[in-house]
Image (cartoon, rainbow, N blue to C red):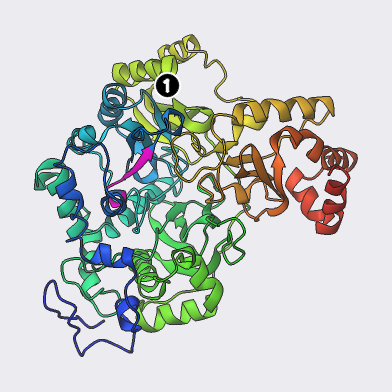
Amino acid sequence: MQRVTVTAGSEERSSELQGSRPFSPCIANGAERSKFEQLKADSAYLRDPLAAELENDLPNFSDGAVQLLKFHGSYQQDNRENRQKGQERDWQMMLRLRSPAGRIPASLFLAMDDLADRLGNGTLRVTTRQAFQMHGIRKHNLREVIGTIVRGMGSTLAACGDINRNVMAPAAPFDKGAYPAARQLANDIADTLSPVAAEGAYLDLWVDGELSYRIKPTRAVNKVRERQHDAGVFSGDAEEPLYGTTYLPRKFKCAVTVPGDNSVDLLTQDIGLVAFADANGALRGCNVYVGGGMGRTHNKEETFARTADALGYVDAEHVLDLVQAILALQRDYGDRQNRRHSRMKYLIHDQGIAWFKQELKAKYFAHPIKGMRLEPKAKLQDYLGWHRQGTGKWFVGIPLLCGRLAGELKRGLRELVETYQLEVRLTPNQDLLLCNIGTAQRASVRTALEAMGITTPEAPPLLARHAIACPALPLCGLAVTEAERILPQVLDRLDAQLRRLEIEKPMLVRMTGCPNGCARPYMAELGLVGDGVNQYQVWLGGTPNLTRLAEPYVEKMPLEKLESTLEPLLLGWKAAGGRRSFGDYVAKLGREQVESLLAATA
């Protein structure tokens, strides 16, 4: 690839550039930048106006600063339940960690636990992207919270915003097979796609520019990052070579897994990688999937959930180059005028996977993309209960419905982590693993868990085992109704209905308070998607192993009609003998018959 030279901080372009590839479509296509794109371009790599507003005494940030704050890992929220007419909103910040593969060292967990109690709302929450969120942080405390996290060897940079988000991988700390390689690859992708100039802004704002806290990539990652200045991948900006001054059109999500393990919801990612290793555990290469995404908007048919397409197999030495090449292609061709149409899934849907692959190989990636390798049937793994981690070590998976850590459970887990210096790993299913437990410590840890009421972590209630929900009300500004707070009640009701009908098989249930899809409801066998106060769309027909999209069947179902709506389908499923999963039963019936059964209850 040719090396491109530009004047630092400018938009001058070298004549060596190949083809007519646009650097920044909002300029190269002759269109004026949108207000948000201009905000990013004028921000001095995500500093302004955020830096100035951190120094004032106001309880909240302006709209411009709020948008930049996302790149630093935080959302501004208002507790709607505390709103009073004529009074200021109850402004507070949500903060999210960057933790590839969900790894949280003991020291960082203890720091987060302390911060949540002192400067948050007393809770921590495991997200569906394997990171902790804190809620209830006041603006004047935000610098202390982020600074403490950074000094504790954590980070919130790029946990939100138009940039690559937290990279997912199987949380299980197995020392066998491709698991170590997958975890390392997730770390390497996170470092490869980390912004350069924005990291400097991040450290300036939160730890007074202390450079010792910079991300420290491996030598292999540094070599790949050097190639961000090469023609094709280069953004045209020397200080932010991969992203440029306007970063990405929207968020970008990556996940890595091993053959057969679909704990990461692989097909919902912008880039999904299946890592193959040799007999010694060294990475051989990856099957690559592109163009997944869950977000959509009610009553906007041009927005939709989509599963990823197979791109091909790439040898290990080229995987990181491929990942940054794909991101660069989306940077250049993703829609920057219409944010609803800006994700890579729409680019691939509109142009086709053949065009995407051809464009990638012609202008961004010079190495072979081979045919996909055969994979075993995928399974949604959760790692709950006790497992051998490696020689002399164990881990235990603890179910956390909706991922919320609070009260006695939070205090008990802190004591365990502090006493035995256990590493914590978070799963995409919002559960928590306690890792590096020595054989001699197993009995003590087991006794402590039993004292906390966790007697059979390997066997939570069937419906609760894989059910997840987004936070929704009262803090999420996008929520139109409840999700996390009522999911336990919804599962209890469904469980009672299944018991009454003498159905012993579970179903995969996911629930969100709006259509944006943070809990990935469109992959569930039963997805409940908020569409009004106590009203939900009903999505049916996903699979237990997360390999097929569900379809919408009911709009604005009042929650009190949940049982009566599902009853005819559940009876039919029972009559069919229960050989198939509920999602497969619905898919086999076909849309016409399912709608007919649902119409009987309308």
Which residue is depicted at the point 82% across and 57% down? 590
Of the 4 image quadrants, the one containing the C terminus is top right
Residue 146 image position (x, y, % from top left): 22, 38
Query: Foreground: 29 or 457?
Result: 29
Residue 136 image position (x, y, % from top left): 34, 30
Q: Is residue 214 visible?
A: no
Left or right, 507 with respect to 200, comes to right
- Secondary structure found at label 1: loop
Residue 41 image position (x, y, % from top left): 23, 66
- Magenta range is 70-77
Looking at this rendering, what residue extends furthest in the front direction? Answer: 86
Q: Which residue is mark 1?
A: 406
Q: Is residue 455 above or below residue 460?
A: above
Of the 4 image quadrants, the one containing the N terminus is bottom left
Left or right, 298 with respect to 154, comes to right
Image quadrant of residue 304? bottom right
Image quadrant of residue 567? top right
Left or right, 219 with respect to 87, comes to left
